[in-house]
């Protein structure tokens, strides 16, 4: 079975398409004049945290590099840069205002996602290495 990252749709990797669609969706969501009335009364900070947690996770999934720290730093800087732009452009939307606490929620969501992604990935790699060594020992 191929991994999701290898699946292509319209010539693009599926992960990249999901990232692009998601990024457009959060841009739209953070620039709506008011929240739709049908949405539950979830904290604005929780929505910012969750949106940027998912964005950072998708960026982790869609990028590749052997240098983990450089890749993690690039992803965090990308998310933080976008968070700044996102908050600044909300000043141009009626009913929306830039908020430092929203930026803090964005930053926390991004940093936590990157930390969790690379931690789980490292643990998964260790598990696979141990499993591979056990299989190799059995076949000898």
Image: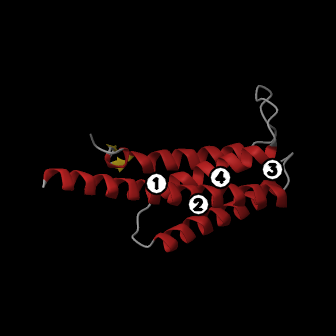
User: In the rendered structure, which disc, 3 or 4, sits on the residue that comes first in sequence?
Assistant: 4
Pair 1/3: label in front = 1
Residue 61's disc number: 1
Depth check: give the residue in front, 61 or 17: 61
| Figure check: 2 above or below 87 | above
Q: Is residue 41 visible?
A: yes
Name the front one of labels 3 and 4: 4
* Type of colouring: secondary structure
Residue 112 picture location, percent across and down: 64, 57
- Whether pointer 3 and pointer 2 mark residues with C-beta atoms closer than 8 Å, the reply is no
Relative side of 34 to 47, left or right? right
* Location of residue 99 by image quarter: bottom right
Marked residue nearer the N-terminal end (1 or 3): 1
Q: Which residue is mark 4?
A: 52
For disc 2, the marked residue is 115
Q: Which mark is residue 93?
A: 3
Gap in Å between the C-alphas at discs 4 and 2?
Answer: 13 Å
Quadrant location of the C terminus in the rendered image: bottom left
Is 94 left, or right, of 134 in this rendering?
right
Left or right, 122 with reference to 140: right
As measured in the structure, the alpha-carbon distance from the residue carrying label 3 to the one carrying label 4 is: 20 Å
Closer to the camera: disc 2 or disc 1?
Answer: 2
Q: Residue at x 57, y 71 (%)?
A: 73
Label 1 with label 3: CB-CB less than 8 Å:
no
């Amino acid at each position: 079975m191929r991994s999701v990252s290898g699946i292509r749709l319209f010539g693009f990797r599926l992960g990249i398409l999901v990232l692009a669609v998601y990024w457009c969706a959060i841009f739209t969501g953070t620039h709506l004049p008011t929240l739709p009335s049908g949405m539950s009364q979830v904290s604005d900070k929780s929505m910012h945290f969750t949106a940027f947690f998912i964005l950072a996770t998708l960026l982790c999934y869609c990028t590749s590099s052997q240098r983990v720290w450089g890749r993690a730093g690039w992803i965090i800087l990308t998310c933080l840069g976008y968070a700044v732009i996102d908050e600044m452009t909300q000043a141009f939307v009626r009913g929306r205002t830039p908020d430092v606490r929203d930026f803090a929620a964005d930053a926390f969501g991004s940093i936590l996602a990157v930390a969790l992604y690379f931690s789980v990935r490292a643990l998964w790699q260790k598990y696979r290495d141990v499993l591979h060594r056990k299989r190799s020992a059995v076949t000898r």
